[in-house]
Image (tube, rainbow, N blue to C red):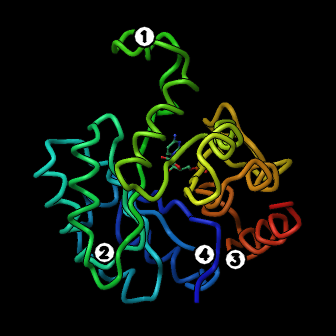
Amino acid sequence: MNNSRIIVALDYATADQALKFINRLEPASCRIKVGKELFCRSGPALVEKLVRLDFDVFLDLKFHDIPNTVAQACRAAADLGVWMMNVHALGGSKMMEAACSALAGQAQRPLLIAVTVLTSLDEHDIKAVGLSGSTVQNVERLALLARHAGMDGVVCSPQEAAVLRKSIGDEFCLVTPGIRPAGSTQDDQRRVMTPHEAIHSGADYLVIGRPITAASDPMHALMTIKAEIETAVV
Ligand code: C5P
């Protein structure tokens, strides 16, 4: 059984590139994330192929629409055999409840995760879209709304993980991108944490892209990060 807490972001433009990379990873050593670009280019066929290769797939399409449309989209994604998928909490309680109901009764129910506030939005952007309060207040409120709607967890920045873990308890899944092993380049990420710090802050799963995908030996990079998080206090 896969108990890895690392989700490798498969940020490639084509199925060929993604599969070439995937060949260098062991399915049991990580999970993988397929986002909008790869999905729009390579579609459900690639997701099904990755599932057939025994990878746990996080389908990161961030659904946000009326409840019925999101419910049907979630059912369709679940039929692909994905392990995790997500929707925007700003779609509201009814939308999230519809998504949860759509997955109830699935033989292997995927984890359903909410996006609270995109980490690309700063305090000014948040006010401009009409939300009052600080970023962290909005994140906390939306995470609680997601939990009450029956969602399994949220995607959040590692900085928000500690606050959420305290206010929302242990049974809620926290998925954090923005992870950089000590000494590695930040790329375009601004507020990063090391894998050890993120786990220590309460994260359950770490989404990590370039520190693994751009490494000359991805399996070695992955195993080094795994060893690092095993030393974190959880
Ligand atoms: O290469 P890197 O580790 O920065 O990749 C992080 C992954 O997590 C990318 O797929 C990125 O789109 C995603 N992500 C993020 N920040 C968010 C939400 C998702 O970096 N707030």
Label 2, label 1: how far apart the Cα atoms are: 39 Å
Tell me the quarter of the picture where residue 27 sits: bottom right
232 w.r.t. 138: above or below? below
Q: Amino acid at mark 3?
A: Met
Q: Badge 1: few (under 14), some or many (20 or more) residues near its Cα, within 10 Å?
A: some
- The residue identified by callout 2 is 46
Q: Amino acid at mark 2?
A: Leu
Of mark 2 and mark 1, the one earlier in the sequence is 2
Of mark 4 and mark 1, the one earlier in the sequence is 4
Q: Which mark is residue 30?
A: 4
Of mark 2 and mark 4, the one earlier in the sequence is 4
Q: Badge 3: few (under 14), some or many (20 or more) residues near its Cα, within 10 Å?
A: some
- Beta carbon at label 3 within 8 Å of ligand 1: no
- List x then y, in percent, for residue 133: 50, 14
Q: Which mark is residue 127?
A: 1
Q: Nearer the viewer, residue 217 or 60?
A: 60
Horizontally, is 46 left or right of 218 in the view?
A: left
Horizontally, is 178 left or right of 134 in the view?
A: right
Q: Badge 2: few (under 14), some or many (20 or more) residues near its Cα, within 10 Å?
A: many
* Residue at image point 34% right, 12% down: 130
- List x then y, in percent, for residue 11: 46, 57
| Quarter the N terminus occupies | bottom right
Label 3, label 4: how far apart the Cα atoms are: 10 Å
